[in-house]
Image: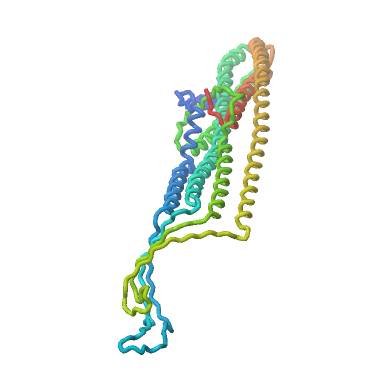
Amino acid sequence: MKVNEQKYTKMKQLLSVLLLLISMVGFSQDPLVLELSECVEKALSNHPKYRDSVYITEISRLKMQNVRTGFYPRVDMNAKAQYLSDVIDIGVKSAIPGLEFPSPQNDQYNLTLDVTQVIYDGGIIRSQEDLAQLSGMVDNQQLKVELYQIRERVNTLFFNVLFLQQKSELIKSAAGKLLEKRKEICSAVDNGLLTQSDLYMLDAEILKLNQQFSEVSFSVSSGIQVLEMYMDTLLPVNILLSKPKLEVNYSGLVKRPEYPLFDYQLKQLSINDNLLEASKRPKVSGFGQVGYGRPGLNYLNDEFDSFYIVGARFTWNIWDWNKTNREREQIVLKKNLVSSQKKTFDENLYILLSRVRKEIQKWQVMIERDLDIIELTSKVVKASESRLKNGVITTAEYINDLHRQIQAKIDMELHEIRLIESKTKYMTLKGMPLRH
């Protein structure tokens, strides 16, 4: 019975080890590498808002075409039929035989073709055309600002998945090291230097690492699925995210999309001001009318007749009850509002850049400390391996030393990725391209 229990225990341990190896096979095959720049570009180009730029440009073009029609002649056709309860009646009978003063009929009909041509509008149409063009530029720039926020979210997701993948590699490496150490412990148990419980403890640690590996792998898969949604691309199971190598430019100009947006908004308000000024100027237009009806222009003629009218019109709104001045005050206040928003954005961006720059310095210092810690823990583990082999310490003590070394490596990997992430965040905040 005791022999069967030992066989069952060894078989269970062997099965656990095989399961660990099988779970790592998918990651040992030749993986495909995904760069951060490729990830961001695909996420932006496949975002639904990315296609909005085409629509905005087309809408702006159509608006400008409609505005330009103000320079063309306006042609209207009008028809009218009416019945008058009373018409013109001179009320005097002619003393001359055969001479009568006819009255128009009560039912009257009129069909006209009216043409109006703008000669001078004070610059209204030109200002409206500029305004339509700039409105499209404002909408397009606003779209770029919204898409820029997608870039920041993809960056954060990319680095989270990258850290998890690096962590899984460290766990896999540690598990492989314990699998190799298991042979030595089995030999030490057979020689009486270690007990069977030491082997059980090692197997339990291998299973624990297997469990951690599985947990991290699930998190990686979840993060990859979110990246797939952003990129609208199906990624291979064994995809590996590449660790970017960036050069940070601390002295370069800030090229955030918000700044052109502020400038366009201010220009848009200036054009609105020009439009108000144009509306106060006099307007001159020419007009013509060709018609047919009863009566024509001669109301004393009771027959259907054709007619035409040509002329020019001059208009000038010399008093609007101070409406234009109040609208101009609104424009000034809106300009102040945009300037205030720009100043607030400047201050917030300066604070963020300063904070991220401090983060970069912090991670650099942390990595220097990590190197020292890893060097010391590696020496401890190496000494523990020798002492375990000679039966001086227990497996539990060796595993504790190994844990400290693994955690030190994981910490350093995390700090390295956080350093790259902070550099990426700094360049993204400045609106600069990521240079590798």
Residue 16 percent location from the top left of the image: 54, 26
Residue 82, located in which quarter of the rendered image? bottom left
Q: Residue farthest to the front?
A: 96
Would residue 185 be found to the left or right of residue 56 on screen?
right
Q: Residue at x 45, y 52 (%)?
A: 67
Residue 173, located in which quarter of the rendered image? top right
Q: Give the number of callouts.
A: 0
Q: How is the image coloured?
A: rainbow
Q: Vertical placement of 153 versus 87: above or below?
A: above
Residue 426 visible in the displayed image: yes
Residue 31 percent location from the top left of the image: 46, 25
Residue 147 percent location from the top left of the image: 53, 39
Residue 2 visible in the displayed image: no
Q: Vertical placement of 269 versus 6: above or below?
A: below
Residue nearest the viewer, comparing 62 with 224: 62
Q: Vertical placement of 268 versus 211: above or below?
A: below
Residue nearest the viewer, comparing 387 with 411: 411
Would residue 304 be found to the left or right of residue 321 on screen?
left
Q: Vertical placement of 92 versus 385: above or below?
A: below
The quarter of the picture where the N terminus appears is top right
Residue nearest the viewer, comparing 373 with 245: 245
Q: Residue at x 65, y 44 (%)?
A: 336
Would residue 64 be found to the left or right of residue 318 on screen?
left
Residue 342, located in which quarter of the rendered image? top right
Residue 41 percent location from the top left of the image: 48, 33
